[in-house]
């Protein structure tokens, strides 16, 4: 499935009613988190909370940092306690749902989202996330129906549509929901305001995916030491070019061009035969009248001469469904061309 956990937003709009010095401290910690300095930001937020243990924004920020560090159990405890102390805030419930869903606890996620909506009925993100949870549960129900009756064509059609919504044939999603930062003051507000929607987690997908800067490598000279230094950048650029060409072919509904981006030894999501996987992909790419696939914030990791991975946020839109999620492509270089060996939903 493709509809996956949208990472906790890194662009926090801190709307604090606390003293300026406290606001500055939390903003500094937020910047550290955005720069990937997670252990340092966690240490600083712990020091901050030692002097202000009930500060809602600081506690929420700690939950975000723990989530970014993949310490889900601790993050759940932070958001759970925050929702108990400040039950009028919708964001802790929403992020609890994200974490529960990442663990496959979809009923707990549903309950948390319903609490978020009761607290703030106009909280659009929670409504959309609840729809994503229902889509996941529907997928499981249709799949069970087909296990019981493989000739059920209605269930097959519905499962295919849900499959396109939550993934286009990739691995099972762990968390079909979005998380969003809270805008809170030190003390709980009388009524929680609708949170800002940063690009990473906005309900509406951005009109165009921002492209990562791709510095052009200098032309290497034979036997020159500088040539080796330029190679990683050049390879990263080549990998990104291949990924964007793959997304472009998918968007054009160019099925042969799209499938040509997969290596001969591509690992199909469920271990099914390559021919069966290609047949399903042809159906799903051809079914919508229009498809748009956007690659956002790609990060390339080169390992060796012929292997790489690319992690990015994928926005998928068609006339049938819309979905977003984080994906990793495991790439292999074959005959000078970067191809996809494996797709992973993160």
Image (cartoon, helix red, strand yellow):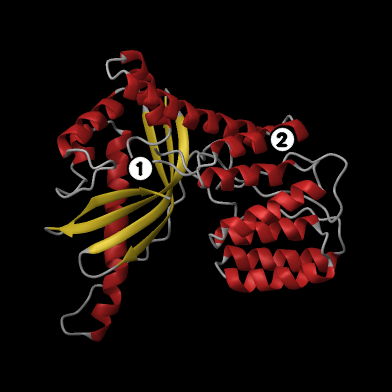
Q: How many marks?
A: 2
Q: Quadrant of residue 259?
A: top left
- The image shows residue 176 at horizontal and vertical percentages of 50, 39
Q: Are marks 1 and 2 in contact (CB under 8 Å)?
A: no
Instruction: Name which of mark 1 and mark 2 comes first in the sequence.
Output: 2
Query: Circle 2 sits on which residue?
Result: 115
- The image shows residue 18 at horizontal and vertical percentages of 86, 60
Residue drawn where x is 23% and y is 48% of the image: 267
- In the figure, is residue 282 to the left or right of 53? left
Q: Quadrant of residue 50?
A: bottom right
Q: Is residue 251 above or below residue 346?
A: above
Residue drawn where x is 69% and y is 43% of the image: 93
Disc 1/disc 2 C-alpha distance (Å): 29 Å
Is residue 226 visible from the viewing direction of this image? yes
The crowding category of the residue bearing disc 1, from other C-alpha atoms within 10 Å (few below 14, some 14 to 19, many at least 20), is some
For the N terminus, the quadrant is top left
Is residue 12 visible from the viewing direction of this image? no
Query: Circle 1 sits on which residue?
Result: 171
Q: Nearer the viewer, residue 310 or 251?
A: 310
Helix, strand or loop at mark 2: helix
Residue drawn where x is 74% and y is 64% of the image: 26
- The image shows residue 143 at horizontal and vertical percentages of 37, 27
């Amino acid at each position: 499935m493709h509809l996956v956990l949208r990472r906790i937003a890194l662009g926090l709009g801190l709307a604090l009613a606390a003293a300026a010095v406290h606001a500055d401290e939390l903003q500094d910690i937020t910047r550290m988190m955005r720069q990937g300095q997670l252990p340092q930001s966690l240490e600083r937020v712990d020091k901050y909370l030692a002097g202000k243990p009930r500060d809602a924004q600081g506690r929420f920020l700690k939950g975000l940092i723990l989530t970014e560090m993949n310490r889900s159990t601790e993050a759940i405890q932070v958001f759970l306690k925050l929702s108990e102390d400040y039950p009028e805030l919708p964001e802790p419930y929403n992020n609890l749902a994200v974490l529960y869903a990442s663990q496959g606890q979809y009923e707990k996620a549903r309950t948390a989202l319903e609490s978020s909506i009761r607290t703030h009925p106009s909280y659009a993100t929670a409504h959309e996330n609840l729809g994503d949870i229902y889509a996941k549960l529907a997928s499981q129900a249709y799949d069970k129906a087909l296990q019981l009756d493989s000739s059920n064509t209605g269930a097959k059609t519905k499962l295919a549509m849900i499959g396109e919504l939550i993934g286009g044939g990739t691995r099972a999603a762990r968390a079909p929901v979005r998380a969003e930062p809270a805008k809170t003051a030190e003390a709980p507000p009388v009524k929680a305001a609708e949170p800002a929607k940063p690009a990473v987690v906005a309900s509406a997908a951005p009109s165009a995916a921002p492209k990562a800067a791709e510095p052009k490598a200098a032309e290497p000279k034979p036997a020159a030491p500088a040539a080796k230094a330029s190679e990683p950048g050049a390879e990263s650029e080549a990998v990104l070019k291949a990924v964007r060409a793959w997304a472009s072919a998918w968007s054009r509904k160019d099925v042969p061009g799209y499938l040509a981006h997969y290596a001969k030894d591509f690992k199909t999501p469920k271990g099914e035969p390559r021919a069966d996987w290609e047949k399903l992909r042809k159906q799903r790419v051809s079914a919508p009248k229009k498809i748009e696939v956007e690659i956002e914030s790609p990060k390339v990791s080169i390992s060796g001469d012929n292997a790489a991975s690319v992690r990015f946020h994928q926005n998928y839109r068609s006339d049938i469904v819309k979905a977003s999620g984080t994906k990793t492509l495991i790439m292999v270089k074959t005959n000078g061309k970067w191809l996809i060996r494996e797709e992973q939903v993160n």
